[in-house]
Image: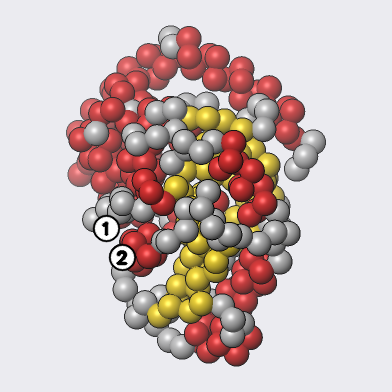
Amino acid sequence: MSGATWLDIFLLCHNRPESTRAVIQSILAQQVGGFRLIVSDNSSDQRVAEMVRAEFPGVILVNRGCVPALQHFNACIAEARADYFCLFHDDDLMGANFVAELRQAVELFPEAVAIGANAWEVNLSTGSRKLSVRGFGRHQRLTSARDLFRRYFGRHQTGFVPFPAYVYRTVVAGRQRIPEGGGKYADVSWLLNLAQLGPVVWWHQPLMDYHLHGGNDGMQESRRARLRLLGYIKSNPVCAGSSGLGDYRYLIYKLIVAADAANPDHQLRVQRLRYFLRWQKLRRHLRITDLAALVRKAILKRQTRSGE
Protein backbone atom coordinates (compact mmCIF):
# COMPACT_ATOMS: atom_id res chain seq x y z
CA MET A 1 0.00 0.00 0.00
CA SER A 2 1.72 3.14 -1.22
CA GLY A 3 2.37 6.26 0.87
CA ALA A 4 1.22 7.33 4.32
CA THR A 5 -2.25 8.34 3.09
CA TRP A 6 -4.06 5.19 2.03
CA LEU A 7 -7.68 6.45 2.16
CA ASP A 8 -9.53 9.43 0.68
CA ILE A 9 -12.72 10.15 2.62
CA PHE A 10 -15.15 12.24 0.60
CA LEU A 11 -17.82 13.77 2.83
CA LEU A 12 -20.76 14.48 0.53
CA CYS A 13 -22.75 17.45 1.85
CA HIS A 14 -26.00 19.15 0.89
CA ASN A 15 -27.52 21.94 3.00
CA ARG A 16 -26.88 20.34 6.42
CA PRO A 17 -24.30 22.50 8.25
CA GLU A 18 -25.19 21.23 11.74
CA SER A 19 -24.96 17.53 10.92
CA THR A 20 -21.92 18.18 8.71
CA ARG A 21 -20.13 19.65 11.72
CA ALA A 22 -20.85 16.49 13.76
CA VAL A 23 -19.68 14.20 10.95
CA ILE A 24 -16.43 16.13 10.45
CA GLN A 25 -15.76 15.91 14.18
CA SER A 26 -16.35 12.15 14.12
CA ILE A 27 -13.96 11.72 11.18
CA LEU A 28 -11.22 13.87 12.71
CA ALA A 29 -11.54 11.85 15.95
CA GLN A 30 -10.22 8.67 14.29
CA GLN A 31 -7.87 6.56 16.39
CA VAL A 32 -5.31 6.49 13.57
CA GLY A 33 -4.28 8.69 10.67
CA GLY A 34 -3.52 7.64 7.11
CA PHE A 35 -6.54 9.34 5.54
CA ARG A 36 -7.35 12.57 3.73
CA LEU A 37 -10.71 14.26 4.37
CA ILE A 38 -12.34 16.12 1.49
CA VAL A 39 -15.60 17.97 2.23
CA SER A 40 -17.47 17.88 -1.06
CA ASP A 41 -20.12 20.59 -0.74
CA ASN A 42 -23.03 20.25 -3.16
CA SER A 43 -25.26 22.71 -1.30
CA SER A 44 -27.58 25.31 -2.81
CA ASP A 45 -26.29 27.93 -0.33
CA GLN A 46 -23.07 28.82 1.49
CA ARG A 47 -23.90 27.68 5.04
CA VAL A 48 -21.86 24.46 4.90
CA ALA A 49 -18.89 26.16 3.21
CA GLU A 50 -18.89 29.04 5.70
CA MET A 51 -19.03 26.66 8.67
CA VAL A 52 -16.15 24.52 7.33
CA ARG A 53 -13.93 27.55 6.61
CA ALA A 54 -14.60 29.04 10.03
CA GLU A 55 -14.36 25.90 12.19
CA PHE A 56 -12.17 23.47 10.21
CA PRO A 57 -9.74 25.65 8.22
CA GLY A 58 -7.33 22.76 7.67
CA VAL A 59 -9.91 20.56 5.94
CA ILE A 60 -10.03 20.41 2.14
CA LEU A 61 -13.27 22.00 0.85
CA VAL A 62 -14.55 21.52 -2.70
CA ASN A 63 -17.61 23.41 -3.97
CA ARG A 64 -19.64 21.40 -6.51
CA GLY A 65 -22.24 24.04 -7.35
CA CYS A 66 -25.35 21.99 -6.56
CA VAL A 67 -25.13 19.43 -9.36
CA PRO A 68 -27.41 16.32 -9.56
CA ALA A 69 -26.68 13.82 -6.78
CA LEU A 70 -25.21 11.04 -8.93
CA GLN A 71 -23.05 13.53 -10.81
CA HIS A 72 -21.75 14.59 -7.41
CA PHE A 73 -20.84 11.00 -6.53
CA ASN A 74 -19.04 10.54 -9.84
CA ALA A 75 -17.06 13.76 -9.43
CA CYS A 76 -15.68 12.44 -6.15
CA ILE A 77 -14.86 9.04 -7.65
CA ALA A 78 -12.94 10.72 -10.47
CA GLU A 79 -10.89 12.73 -7.97
CA ALA A 80 -9.85 9.82 -5.71
CA ARG A 81 -6.04 9.65 -5.51
CA ALA A 82 -5.31 7.38 -2.53
CA ASP A 83 -5.25 3.59 -2.82
CA TYR A 84 -8.81 3.48 -1.44
CA PHE A 85 -11.68 5.94 -1.22
CA CYS A 86 -14.92 6.28 0.75
CA LEU A 87 -18.13 8.20 -0.09
CA PHE A 88 -19.48 9.19 3.31
CA HIS A 89 -22.75 11.05 3.94
CA ASP A 90 -23.37 14.25 5.90
CA ASP A 91 -26.19 12.80 8.02
CA ASP A 92 -24.35 9.81 9.53
CA LEU A 93 -21.53 9.45 12.07
CA MET A 94 -18.20 7.64 11.71
CA GLY A 95 -17.00 5.48 14.58
CA ALA A 96 -13.57 6.30 16.01
CA ASN A 97 -12.17 2.94 14.83
CA PHE A 98 -13.57 3.12 11.25
CA VAL A 99 -10.21 3.85 9.57
CA ALA A 100 -8.19 1.51 11.79
CA GLU A 101 -10.50 -1.47 11.32
CA LEU A 102 -10.88 -1.03 7.59
CA ARG A 103 -7.11 -0.69 7.22
CA GLN A 104 -6.90 -4.17 8.76
CA ALA A 105 -9.59 -5.37 6.37
CA VAL A 106 -7.89 -4.12 3.21
CA GLU A 107 -4.59 -5.67 4.34
CA LEU A 108 -6.37 -8.98 4.91
CA PHE A 109 -8.23 -8.79 1.58
CA PRO A 110 -6.00 -6.83 -0.85
CA GLU A 111 -7.84 -8.39 -3.81
CA ALA A 112 -11.25 -7.03 -2.74
CA VAL A 113 -12.69 -4.29 -4.94
CA ALA A 114 -14.87 -3.00 -2.09
CA ILE A 115 -15.03 -3.57 1.67
CA GLY A 116 -18.07 -2.49 3.65
CA ALA A 117 -18.35 -2.08 7.39
CA ASN A 118 -21.31 -3.09 9.48
CA ALA A 119 -23.26 -0.22 11.03
CA TRP A 120 -25.76 0.62 13.71
CA GLU A 121 -28.99 1.69 12.02
CA VAL A 122 -30.26 4.46 14.29
CA ASN A 123 -33.86 5.60 13.91
CA LEU A 124 -33.76 9.27 14.85
CA SER A 125 -37.54 9.38 15.43
CA THR A 126 -37.72 6.51 17.92
CA GLY A 127 -34.14 6.33 19.17
CA SER A 128 -34.04 2.58 18.43
CA ARG A 129 -31.03 0.96 16.82
CA LYS A 130 -30.17 -2.35 15.21
CA LEU A 131 -27.31 -3.92 13.30
CA SER A 132 -27.37 -3.36 9.55
CA VAL A 133 -26.12 -6.86 8.77
CA ARG A 134 -25.78 -10.09 10.74
CA GLY A 135 -23.21 -12.76 9.97
CA PHE A 136 -21.05 -15.52 11.40
CA GLY A 137 -17.44 -14.76 12.24
CA ARG A 138 -15.56 -11.55 11.64
CA HIS A 139 -16.39 -11.03 7.96
CA GLN A 140 -18.08 -12.35 4.83
CA ARG A 141 -16.30 -12.60 1.49
CA LEU A 142 -18.76 -12.34 -1.41
CA THR A 143 -17.18 -13.76 -4.53
CA SER A 144 -19.72 -12.83 -7.21
CA ALA A 145 -22.37 -10.29 -8.15
CA ARG A 146 -24.98 -13.02 -7.75
CA ASP A 147 -23.86 -13.64 -4.18
CA LEU A 148 -24.08 -9.92 -3.41
CA PHE A 149 -27.51 -9.72 -5.03
CA ARG A 150 -28.84 -12.52 -2.81
CA ARG A 151 -27.65 -10.63 0.27
CA TYR A 152 -29.76 -7.65 -0.79
CA PHE A 153 -32.87 -9.30 -2.19
CA GLY A 154 -32.93 -12.94 -1.08
CA ARG A 155 -36.07 -14.10 0.67
CA HIS A 156 -34.37 -14.59 4.03
CA GLN A 157 -31.60 -12.02 3.74
CA THR A 158 -29.95 -10.97 6.99
CA GLY A 159 -29.35 -7.32 6.23
CA PHE A 160 -26.75 -5.51 4.15
CA VAL A 161 -23.98 -2.95 4.50
CA PRO A 162 -25.15 0.66 4.02
CA PHE A 163 -23.68 2.49 1.05
CA PRO A 164 -21.58 5.11 3.00
CA ALA A 165 -19.85 2.33 4.97
CA TYR A 166 -17.86 1.06 1.95
CA VAL A 167 -14.27 1.75 1.01
CA TYR A 168 -13.28 1.05 -2.61
CA ARG A 169 -10.00 0.03 -4.23
CA THR A 170 -9.23 3.00 -6.45
CA VAL A 171 -7.29 1.15 -9.14
CA VAL A 172 -10.49 -0.77 -9.99
CA ALA A 173 -13.48 1.21 -8.69
CA GLY A 174 -11.95 4.57 -9.60
CA ARG A 175 -12.33 3.68 -13.28
CA GLN A 176 -16.04 2.99 -12.91
CA ARG A 177 -18.91 5.45 -12.63
CA ILE A 178 -22.33 5.26 -11.01
CA PRO A 179 -24.92 5.24 -13.83
CA GLU A 180 -26.43 8.74 -13.69
CA GLY A 181 -29.68 7.49 -15.21
CA GLY A 182 -29.95 4.73 -12.63
CA GLY A 183 -32.25 6.58 -10.22
CA LYS A 184 -32.30 6.17 -6.46
CA TYR A 185 -31.08 2.55 -6.59
CA ALA A 186 -28.10 3.38 -8.77
CA ASP A 187 -25.85 2.61 -5.80
CA VAL A 188 -27.03 -1.01 -5.91
CA SER A 189 -26.29 -1.36 -9.63
CA TRP A 190 -22.88 0.28 -9.02
CA LEU A 191 -22.05 -2.31 -6.36
CA LEU A 192 -23.27 -5.15 -8.58
CA ASN A 193 -21.04 -3.87 -11.38
CA LEU A 194 -18.05 -3.78 -9.01
CA ALA A 195 -18.81 -7.30 -7.75
CA GLN A 196 -18.25 -8.53 -11.32
CA LEU A 197 -14.68 -7.16 -11.17
CA GLY A 198 -13.59 -8.67 -7.86
CA PRO A 199 -14.74 -9.90 -4.46
CA VAL A 200 -16.69 -7.71 -2.04
CA VAL A 201 -16.09 -8.10 1.71
CA TRP A 202 -18.48 -7.28 4.55
CA TRP A 203 -16.72 -6.50 7.85
CA HIS A 204 -19.06 -7.50 10.67
CA GLN A 205 -17.92 -5.06 13.34
CA PRO A 206 -20.20 -1.96 13.33
CA LEU A 207 -18.02 1.05 12.55
CA MET A 208 -20.55 3.83 11.98
CA ASP A 209 -24.02 5.10 12.89
CA TYR A 210 -26.32 5.06 9.87
CA HIS A 211 -29.14 7.49 10.60
CA LEU A 212 -32.70 6.82 9.47
CA HIS A 213 -34.93 9.87 9.18
CA GLY A 214 -37.61 11.40 6.99
CA GLY A 215 -35.04 12.94 4.71
CA ASN A 216 -33.47 9.60 3.73
CA ASP A 217 -34.06 9.01 0.04
CA GLY A 218 -34.04 5.27 0.69
CA MET A 219 -36.98 5.64 3.08
CA GLN A 220 -39.23 6.90 0.28
CA GLU A 221 -40.86 4.22 -1.85
CA SER A 222 -40.53 4.67 -5.62
CA ARG A 223 -42.12 2.21 -8.04
CA ARG A 224 -40.35 3.82 -10.97
CA ALA A 225 -36.96 3.39 -9.31
CA ARG A 226 -37.65 -0.26 -8.47
CA LEU A 227 -38.72 -0.98 -12.04
CA ARG A 228 -35.60 0.77 -13.31
CA LEU A 229 -33.48 -1.53 -11.16
CA LEU A 230 -35.48 -4.49 -12.50
CA GLY A 231 -34.54 -3.38 -16.01
CA TYR A 232 -30.87 -3.29 -15.01
CA ILE A 233 -31.10 -6.80 -13.55
CA LYS A 234 -32.81 -8.17 -16.68
CA SER A 235 -30.11 -6.63 -18.89
CA ASN A 236 -27.36 -8.05 -16.64
CA PRO A 237 -28.49 -11.63 -15.95
CA VAL A 238 -25.12 -12.57 -14.45
CA CYS A 239 -26.00 -10.41 -11.43
CA ALA A 240 -29.05 -12.34 -10.26
CA GLY A 241 -29.75 -15.54 -12.17
CA SER A 242 -33.28 -16.78 -12.75
CA SER A 243 -34.04 -17.41 -9.06
CA GLY A 244 -32.73 -13.98 -8.04
CA LEU A 245 -34.72 -12.27 -10.76
CA GLY A 246 -37.84 -14.11 -9.59
CA ASP A 247 -37.22 -13.04 -5.99
CA TYR A 248 -36.86 -9.40 -6.97
CA ARG A 249 -39.97 -9.51 -9.13
CA TYR A 250 -41.86 -11.07 -6.23
CA LEU A 251 -40.80 -8.17 -4.02
CA ILE A 252 -41.86 -5.36 -6.33
CA TYR A 253 -45.00 -7.08 -7.66
CA LYS A 254 -46.27 -7.48 -4.08
CA LEU A 255 -45.86 -3.73 -3.62
CA ILE A 256 -47.67 -3.01 -6.89
CA VAL A 257 -50.59 -5.31 -6.02
CA ALA A 258 -50.93 -3.74 -2.57
CA ALA A 259 -50.99 -0.24 -4.11
CA ASP A 260 -53.32 -1.00 -7.05
CA ALA A 261 -55.70 -3.62 -5.66
CA ALA A 262 -58.47 -1.09 -4.98
CA ASN A 263 -58.16 0.68 -8.34
CA PRO A 264 -60.80 -0.66 -10.81
CA ASP A 265 -58.68 0.47 -13.77
CA HIS A 266 -55.84 -1.86 -12.79
CA GLN A 267 -57.71 -5.07 -12.03
CA LEU A 268 -56.46 -7.04 -15.05
CA ARG A 269 -52.84 -6.22 -14.21
CA VAL A 270 -53.40 -7.00 -10.54
CA GLN A 271 -54.91 -10.37 -11.43
CA ARG A 272 -51.94 -11.28 -13.64
CA LEU A 273 -49.47 -10.25 -10.95
CA ARG A 274 -51.32 -12.32 -8.37
CA TYR A 275 -50.96 -15.41 -10.57
CA PHE A 276 -47.22 -14.78 -10.73
CA LEU A 277 -47.00 -14.24 -6.96
CA ARG A 278 -48.78 -17.52 -6.21
CA TRP A 279 -46.52 -19.47 -8.55
CA GLN A 280 -43.36 -17.78 -7.31
CA LYS A 281 -44.37 -18.34 -3.70
CA LEU A 282 -44.76 -22.07 -4.37
CA ARG A 283 -41.37 -22.23 -6.08
CA ARG A 284 -39.73 -20.44 -3.17
CA HIS A 285 -41.26 -22.83 -0.63
CA LEU A 286 -39.82 -25.77 -2.57
CA ARG A 287 -36.25 -24.42 -2.69
CA ILE A 288 -33.85 -26.11 -0.27
CA THR A 289 -31.69 -22.98 -0.30
CA ASP A 290 -34.60 -20.96 1.07
CA LEU A 291 -35.05 -23.34 3.99
CA ALA A 292 -31.32 -23.21 4.74
CA ALA A 293 -31.40 -19.39 4.61
CA LEU A 294 -34.36 -19.32 7.01
CA VAL A 295 -32.51 -21.49 9.54
CA ARG A 296 -29.35 -19.38 9.18
CA LYS A 297 -31.32 -16.17 9.72
CA ALA A 298 -32.97 -17.53 12.88
CA ILE A 299 -29.60 -18.57 14.35
CA LEU A 300 -27.98 -15.23 13.54
CA LYS A 301 -30.87 -13.29 15.02
CA ARG A 302 -30.61 -15.19 18.28
CA GLN A 303 -26.82 -14.79 18.47
CA THR A 304 -26.74 -11.06 17.77
CA ARG A 305 -29.87 -9.93 19.62
CA SER A 306 -28.01 -9.54 22.91
CA GLY A 307 -25.68 -6.96 21.33
CA GLU A 308 -28.44 -4.52 20.41
Any part of residue 227 in sight: no
Residue 277: quadrant of the picture: top left
Left or right relative to 128: residue 54: left
x 52%, y 26%: residue: 156
Instruction: Tell whether label 2 touches label 1 (CB within 8 Å).
Output: yes
| Image spot of residue 194 (x, y percent) | 36, 41
> Circle 1 sits in a helix, a strand or a loop, which is it?
loop
Q: Which mark is on residue 180?
A: 1
Viewer-side residue, 290 vs 279: 290
Label ID, residue 135: none
Q: Nearer the viewer, residue 275 or 199?
A: 199
Give the class, few, some or many, for how many residues have Cα within 10 Å of label 1's Cα (few <14, many ≥20): some
SS assignment at label 2: helix
**Residue drawn 46% across the image and 88% down it:** 46
Quadrant holding the C terminus? top right
Question: Which scheme is used to colour this image of the protein?
Answer: secondary structure
The residue at the point 61 percent across, 33 percent down is: 139
Of residue 123 and residue 38, the one placed in the foreground of this image is 38
> In the drawing, does residue 119 fall left or right of residue 190?
right
In the rendered structure, which amino acid carries the disc numbered 1? Glu
Q: Image height check: is 182 above or below 291? A: below
Give the CA separation, mark 1 to mark 2: 7 Å
Q: Position of residue 274 (x, y in %)?
A: 31, 27
From the top left corner, tell me how far across and down residue 177 is, in percent: 30, 54
User: Compared to 88, does 136 lie above or below?
Assistant: above
Residue, x 41% and y 51% (percent of image)? 170
Give the residue number, with chain letter if any, for mark 2: 71
